[in-house]
Image: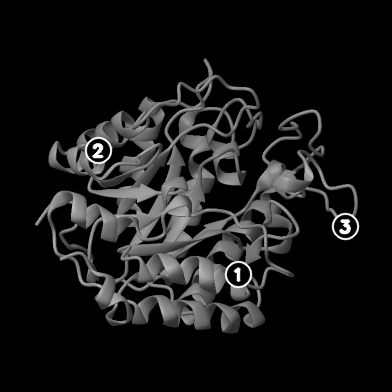
Amino acid sequence: MSKLLSPISIRELHFRNKIFVSPMCQYSAVAGIPNDWHLVHLGSRAVGGAGLVMTEATAVSPEGRISPADLGIWSDEQVGAFSRITDFITKQGAVPGVQLAHAGRKASTKVPWEGDGAVTDGGWEPVAPSPVKFADNYLQPCEMSVADIERVVSCFAEAARRSLASGFRVAEIHMAHGYLIHEFLSPLSNKRKDKYGGRLENRTRFSLEVARAVREVWPEELPLFVRISATDWVEGGWEIEQSIQLAGRLKEAGVDLIDVSSGGNVAGARIPAAPGYQTGFAERIRREAGIMTSAVGLITDPRQAEHILVTGQADVITMAREFLRDPYFPLHAAKTLGDDPPYPPQYLRAKPK
């Protein structure tokens, strides 16, 4: 069996393969509540053979949403709606995961197909480490007080409790793509003069507080992931060396895997996107911080994914847009790599001989 299609265990949780579905915003919720779209979108990737099926960025509070149409997990009504989805994913042999998020200064924005920038009706005031806009067409954020920071840490912990009650078995904390926790990490967006700003130890304080708070309520036998942006792709911003240090501290806080992405904190940053362009960051963090990593970013071919794993650049592969194009990527990858994956019994008559 290929590396890609062989199983992996993290803590006491077993994954049938190393192909994970990345969080992909669908902008289709009402009041943060998942609906039939989310059931079909996430459920089809489970039917398609993924090892882990992760929700989109799921806000820990109403003001933590990117747009008014984002998922959320701040109420018991949302718990009941998610349970239907996690139950279906589990029955298909995949592991259901949730990405816990707060959008920070990039909150209260339009859904992508309606344009860019802030919503003009029904929006709210975003919060951030400092009153620095993401871009001219985004809202001016309010600088968070220490009490505000402590409240958001509690929101992440409560969201983790609700996630567990919803049937999720992996929790991932979103610390990437220019959202709230990333904003604290980067000196380009964090201009604070208190214990949450300035030197690296202070800029990482909030991220570690969130990780510890979630780990405290997340069961010992279940994995905790963190997604980071390894670099801002801008001189003077967050960079890979700082990411390696943060990864080591997150490991000490009980995090099991770093999901390694990049960018998102600086509008107009020049990102050299190419197949596997972020994989080198995953490899360095894995090697230098001694923690499991996931490779993500323009990984579209089974042989490419297999090469990343065989050469030790990452432990798993997390895919986004290729899964939008092909919900059954794992089944097709197995055929390419010469494996014999289990097909859903309803689809057995179409299994290649």
Q: Residue at x 66, y 73 (%)?
A: 33
Q: Is residue 104 shown left or right of residue 98?
A: right
Q: Residue at x 51, y 82 (%)?
A: 83
Q: How many marks?
A: 3
Q: Is residue 158 visible?
A: no
Give the quarter of the figure containing the N terminus.
bottom left
Q: Secondary structure at mark 3?
A: loop
Kindly identify the amino acid type of the residue bearing the numbered disc 3.
Gly
Colour mapping used in the image = one colour
Q: In the rendered image, which quarter is residue 61 located in?
A: bottom right
Asked if residue 132 is positioned above or below residue 129 in the image, the reply reads above
**Residue topped by disc 1:** 37
**Residue topped by disc 2:** 304
**Residue topped by disc 3:** 122
Q: Secondary structure at mark 2?
A: helix
Kindly identify the amino acid type of the residue bearing the numbered disc 1.
Trp
Kindly identify the amino acid type of the residue bearing the numbered disc 2.
Gln
Asked if residue 163 is positioned above or below residue 58 in the image, the reply reads below
Q: Is residue 163 shown left or right of residue 223?
A: right
Given this view, does label 2 or label 3 mark the residue nearer the observer?
A: 2
Q: Secondary structure at mark 1?
A: helix
The answer to which of 136 and 182 lies nearer the viewer is 136
* Residue 267 point in image, percent of width and height: 65, 27
* Residue 242 point in image, percent of width and height: 40, 29
Q: In the rendered image, which quarter is residue 194 located in?
A: top right
Which tag, 3 or 1, sits closer to the chain's start?
A: 1
